[in-house]
Amino acid sequence: MKCTVCREPAVIDLRRHNSNFCAPHFTKFCRDQVAKAVHEFDMIDPQDKVLVAVSGGKDSLAVWDILLDLGYATTGLYIGLGIGEYSDVSKDYARTYAKRRGAELIEVDIVEKYGYDIPDGSKAARRAPCSACGLSKRHIFDDVAL
């Protein structure tokens, strides 16, 4: 499988776009797609301040990276959910990325701020953990954004 652009070995096959890309051209393709979507759907103006919720995973950090590269004033928001080692590791990834890029990262620890973690909060609210987590994250994101 060869890169559609340069004919070097491809690392990904995007059937939806009938294309294969090497790593550098896949990165460019992703950045171009984000820039196109932001422009076409009038999502962000260049002077806007953007708050990006980051989990510490590759997807959210990639979005933050692309927005920074496109010149948007972005701040990352990491919400510690109190889910044991998972939360510690993901927080470290978010911190490392922010430091490497010289970007601002706001950290909110749900246990410190509200006195409960997601597993305990979901039991107290009689909600599924995913429901309690989503509700908590939306509330915190709105609170920080305003």
Image (cartoon, grey):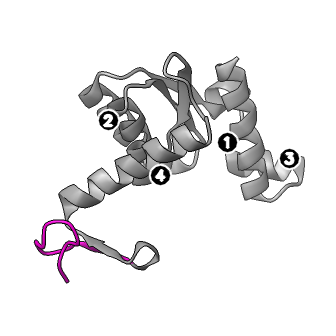
- Whether residue 6 appears in magenta in the rendering, the answer is yes
- Locate residue 57, reporting x and y percent: 43, 51
- Locate residue 72, reporting x and y percent: 43, 25
Mark pair 4, 3: CA separation: 22 Å
Q: Which mark is residue 86?
A: 4
Residue type at mark 3? Answer: Ala
The disc, 4 or 3, on the residue closer to the chain's N-terminal end is 4
At 46% from the left and 25% from the top, the residue drawn is 74
Mark pair 3, 1: CA separation: 11 Å
The disc, 2 or 3, on the residue closer to the chain's N-terminal end is 2
Q: Quadrant of residue 45?
A: top right
- Return the residue at label 1: 117
- Locate residue 114, reporting x and y percent: 72, 28
Q: Nearer the viewer, mark 2 or mark 3?
A: 2
- Return the residue at label 2: 97
The disc, 3 or 1, on the residue closer to the chain's N-terminal end is 1
The disc, 2 or 4, on the residue closer to the chain's N-terminal end is 4
- Return the residue at label 3: 124
Dot 2: few (<14), some (14–19), or many (≥20) neighbours within 10 Å? some
Decide: is 22 above or below 43. Answer: below
Q: Nearer the viewer, mark 4 or mark 3?
A: 4
Along the viewing direction, whichever of 6 and 118 lies nearer the viewer: 6
- C-beta proximity under 8 Å, tags 2 and 1: no
Mark pair 4, 1: CA separation: 13 Å
At 28% from the left and 51% from the top, the residue drawn is 28
Decide: is 143 above or below 25. Answer: above
Q: Is residue 37 visible?
A: yes
Magenta part of the protein: which range? 1-14
Residue type at mark 1? Answer: Asp
Tell me the quadrant of the picture where the N terminus can be found. bottom left
